[in-house]
Image (spheres, helix red, strand yellow):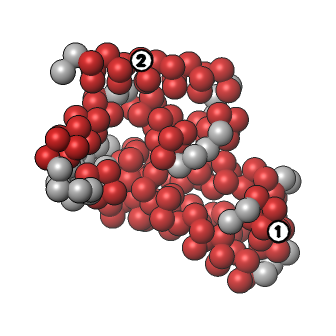
Amino acid sequence: MRDAEHDLLVLDAQRGRRAALDALVRHHHADLVRYAHSLCREPAMARDAVQDAWLTVSRRLRRLDDPRAFRSWVYHAVRWRTLDALRGRQRRAETPLDGVDADVLAGPDDSERREQRLSIRTALDALPELERETLELFYRRGLAVREIAHVQDVPAGTVKSRLFRARRQLQQTLEGE
């Protein structure tokens, strides 16, 4: 979906057009669930957090001043809902890699490539939480630095620093193998 089309959908949804909000949900939902899962590592918790975030977004959508900020705004809502759910459960469940991130682990039956993907996934899991989240938002979800700054409530310079540290740590980990 092009940016202009997306912005028009946001404006239509702000005017109360249900079909526009439904289109936004269809467009963003799967990526938001994957993002929430990357934060909590629990599929059910991730789905619930995203569902709660959509309810909040639908109630507060008219308050959004800039339709171009919608994407970072909805990621921000999902982040807070997920972190609230984690705090409420007071634990962080570790999910085995088997079947969790099928889009990362799936691929040709080439054992060397599969092993490489597994090494990358393991290196990513070893990163500090904020750096891992920042990489997730930047590389896998395609958010810009300014959007990530909004999602994480930090200055853009902090996002750039986290990206730098995470890249450096990944490189060191992967080269050390």
| Residue 139 visible, this orientation | yes
Going by the numbered disc 1, the residue's amino acid type is Leu
Residue that appears at 28% across and 30% down: 123
Front-lying residue, 92 or 105 = 105
Going by the numbered disc 2, the residue's amino acid type is Arg
Q: Residues within 10 Å of mark 1 (few under 14, many from 20)?
A: some
Residue pointed to by mark 1: 8
- Is 64 on the left or on the right of 29, as rendered? right
- The image quadrant that residue 132 belongs to is top left
Position of the C terminus, as image quadrant, is: top left
Percent across and percent down for residue 130 are 45, 30
Residue pointed to by mark 2: 168
Residue that appears at 82% across and 68% down: 8
Q: Does residue 97 sit above or below 158 in this rendering?
A: below
Position of the N terminus, as image quadrant, is: bottom right
- Is 172 on the left or on the right of 14, as rendered? left
Q: Secondary structure at mark 1?
A: helix
Q: How far apart are labels 2 and 1 at the CA level?
A: 39 Å
- The image quadrant that residue 65 belongs to is bottom right
Q: Does residue 79 sit above or below 169 in this rendering?
A: below
Front-lying residue, 53 or 24 = 24
Percent across and percent down for residue 55 are 60, 69
Q: Does residue 91 sit above or below 122 in this rendering?
A: below
